[in-house]
Amino acid sequence: MKFDISCLQPKEQASFALRALYEAAGCRKYHMGRFEEYGLYQENRSFLSSEQVITFTDLDGRLLALKPDVTLSIAKTAQPAPGETLRYYYHENVYRPSAESHTFKEIGQMGLEMLGDVDEGQVRQAVSLAAQSLEQLGQPWVLEVSHMGYLFGLLDALDVPEASRAALLAKLKAKNLHELKAAASAAGLDEAGADALAGLMSLCGSCEDVLPRVEAACRNERMEAAAAELKAITEELAGAGGSIRLDMTLAGEMEYYNGLVFQGYLESLPRPVLKGGRYDLLMQKFTPGAGAIGFAVYLDELDRLSAPLPPVQQQKTEKTMLNVALPKGRLGDKVYNLLAGIGYGCPEDYNATRKLVVENPAAGIRYFLVKPSDVAIYVEHGAADVGIVGKDILTEASADVYELLDTGLGKCRMCVAAPADYKDDPSRPVRVATKFVNIAKSYYASIGRDIDIIKLNGSIELAPILGLSDVIVDIVETGTTLRENGLRVVTEFMPISARFIANKASYQFKHRETDEMLEKLRAALAAKEEKK
């Protein structure tokens, strides 16, 4: 009886197809054990997706870890000889915290690594195999490409201090233009330098459109070399089957990646299904002078492909529908009225119905009415394409989304507040009551102060009145509630307003619709500001 591969689950089908692809490309299978010396991960924490690692003490007393990453182990043990190029692929499980379940999960990966003497030919082959890997998965796909050399070249040209670079790259990766300029100013850049960094935001789109502008913006040889490599790669990928997009805000960890970086997306999946790049800086920690490039395919993400489509996605419409997570309440009403005024209204008044989904297929818009604290979750996990969320909620959730616009709506500030006669006692930890646990921890860590956190969900002002805490960390708008309860603001440390956010994968497939809404929203807000 002939075996029919189509009866397998998507990730099982993918594993057979990818293995055949990599074997045909001359790669050998690399197998490793589940355990690794914990010191390897401790020394290379920033390379990992999370610093949380499962550790245990072996019978000989060594501290070992369940592998959270495969690339580090291969880079450590491969040891290519001078002039040698090693080509490996792997099919392994790694152990990482899950953003969805907040528990550790065993995650299936396949990947490919080229190590040692890595020249332009190997780089082109690796990126081509990444595109072919996406093609094998049987869904519409996008491969997003950038170059760390281009970003480093611009930072060099602008004389950006080394200590400020990681923060600037983080703002770029989030497409957070409004905070990028402030971070550039804090790094000592003048207005022209800040504008040059901000200009990277516009270098995103099809290769035909973006590449000439990438070349024209070069300021030094490093940027020119990176642009030339991007051109060669886009020519290599012509006719690959999916969509190739350049996005010069895409960046990898600056301590390890030095060349091309890329991510692959499948339609209907909320996160990248493939990530990779050139990581000579990591490889040279273990083998001086060696280069490396590789990528991983996250097979477990493919489980979603076998799930039935949600009811709202089963409805056929002529226009591509943009799904918006709209917060219930005053902020949601303000945002909806703003969007309705620029052509995104619905015939049905959502305040006059119990429905949680209202839409206007003619305008290509669908609203999900959700609790404000859940907006970032709906967007991050791909249930909604875009959403409007307060900066407080976005920061507390550490949501991995694009932060495309500060709407300026709902302005307030995150503060430390305390009784009027409060004086800090440095001999003991500060007792802090708050519902913003992560924000409070981050703030006090930044000033080097020990704290004891008391998590509350409401009436935060009551905690210091009853002696439950010394201070509170909470949102303050006018300060009236604080004053009426005998409290005062001790420190203001974070401005709050509503932000327009987008799911990173949805943006790849609905960038036209998202950008159109964004530009209309930006224009409406500017017009509103002028009337004041």
Image (spheres, grey):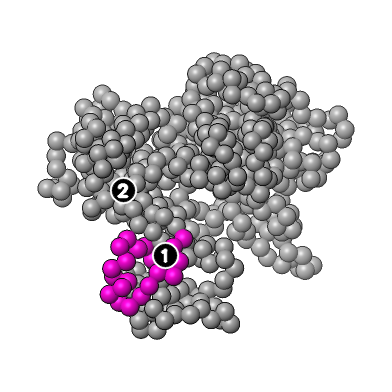
* Residue span colored magenta: 472-493
Q: Which mark is residue 415?
A: 1
Q: Does any portion of residue 66 appear in the rendered image? A: yes
Residue 478 inside the magenta-drawn segment: yes
Q: Dot 1, crowdedness within 10 Å: few (<14), some or many (≥20)?
A: many
Q: Is residue 276 above or below residue 286?
A: above
Toward the viewer: 3 or 127? Answer: 127
Residue 5, image x, y percentages:
51, 31
Q: Residue at x 30, y 62 (%)?
A: 478
| Cβ atoms at labels 1 and 2 below 8 Å apart | no
Q: Which mark is residue 360?
A: none
Q: Check disc 1 and report its element: helix, strand or loop.
A: strand
| 396 with respect to 88 (left or right) | left
| Marked residue nearer the N-terminal end (1 or 2) | 2
Label 1, label 2: how many angstroms apart (C-alpha)? 18 Å
Residue lying furthest left: 352
Three-letter residue code for mark 2: Leu
Residue 217, image x, y percentages:
59, 24
Toward the viewer: 97 or 371? Answer: 371
Residue that mark 2 sits on: 409
Toward the viewer: 444 or 233? Answer: 444
Q: Does any portion of residue 237 appear in the rendered image? A: no
Residue 163, image x, y percentages:
66, 49
Residue 100, image x, y percentages:
45, 53
